[in-house]
Image (cartoon, rainbow, N blue to C red):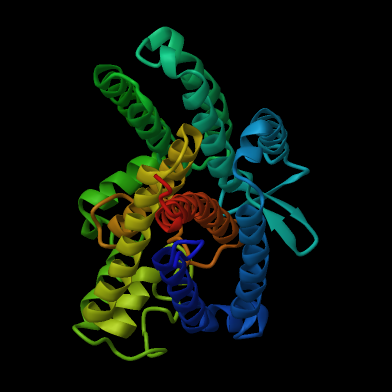
Amino acid sequence: MHTRYDLPLIGATLFLLSWGTVMIYSTGGVYADLQYNDGQYFLYKHLIHILVGLAVMGVALIVNYHKWQQYSIWFMLGMLVLLILVLIPEIGHEVKGGRRWLRMGSFSLQPAELLKVVLIIYVASYLERKQEVLASFFRGLTPNFIVTGIYLFLVLLQPDFGTVVLIATTVLLMLYVGGGRPVHIFTSLIGVGIIGGLLIASHTYRVRRMLAFLNPWDDPYDSGFQIIQSFIALGTGGWLGRGLGESLQKRLFLPDAHTDFIFAIIGEELGFLWVCVLIILFVVFIWRGYWIAWNAQDAFGKHLAFGATTILSLQIILNLFVVVGLLPTKGLPLPFISYGGTSLVVAMFLTGLLLNISGSLHSKEAQLENGLSSRASTPNNE
């Protein structure tokens, strides 16, 4: 008997969503009470985001994933409009110096998050169509670099350096797996690194972040404050934690406790053992995503599943590395766990795509098995 969709992926996703909901209720209460006079404000909003995410996941699950390929150019044009609109002061909404949101009443949208989906679909389609020229740098890779570069430049203007790093790395890995020559990809990676270094050096706040990463105790009350508070949260959790809801750092000591640094509060409240359980759930999710990519029935499905899994796994790794001090602060939420509407909905849509591809895979297996069993049951008249 075959299950239509990948059960381990569904199970890991549901566990992560449930865990995230509990932790947002735990971590966001103090700040929500102070800011909105309602300790459950973030919980209610998060539940709405989950409902929207489930609806979007359902769409990704029901619609044949090849349909997205057919309209990829139109999605790219729409994305270009959104990324330009968000930069207009009268339209784009600014938070903490970043103009990254389009807001209509209580509804807000982060175009850079949507770009993750649109670019993955576009690159996956490109890899299928241009397979024969991918070994050529100028004919195969350069057109894709130009298109991707234009979109990432608009994201950089917001500014959102973390998302640029995430998307650029994902696209390079997709091009490598899709057939790009290793020497071309490696050279491009060096080029991206040089550009990244120049961008860091060109902005004082990025230089301060880098210095805080190297030694946060040089400036413990300013640029190093957040990561030091994260260390304190993780360090005081021990093996079993202080207990759910008992964090001290979430009481306005650790900035972004319910968003980018929620993992530190998980470590403080639940301890090292439960942190390991969380990481295992992420590993299961990533494993199933790459398994689906490896076994997909067509080239577009393979590239799409690989891109979706890669961008989510990279975001998980980058977030965890930032929280434990292995990377400078990037401003990337932890998928399925952190508070953030567009980010959660995008993660759930990508999961829906993976389940859709896995569904087509299991359907083929079931057809093959039924064909074999029907042959075996047919009497031999010879």
The C terminus, quarter of image: top left
23 vs 77: above or below = below
Q: Position of residue 83 (x, y in %)?
A: 66, 36
Is 231 in front, or is 72?
72
Residue at image coords 44%, 36%: 303
Residue at image coords 78%, 43%: 90
Q: Position of residue 1 (x, y in %)?
A: 44, 68
Q: Residue furthest front?
A: 382
Is 18 in front, or is 325?
18
One can see residue 316 in this view? no
Is 288 in front, or is 108?
288
Q: Position of residue 297 (x, y in %)?
A: 45, 40
Residue at image coords 28%, 80%: 274
296 vs 36: above or below = above
30 vs 98: above or below = below
Residue 282, picture quadrant: bottom left
Residue 131, picture quadrant: top left
One can see residue 245 in this view? yes
Q: Position of residue 117 (x, y in %)?
A: 56, 43
**In this image, 331 relative to 99: left or right?**
left
Residue at image coords 29%, 89%: 242
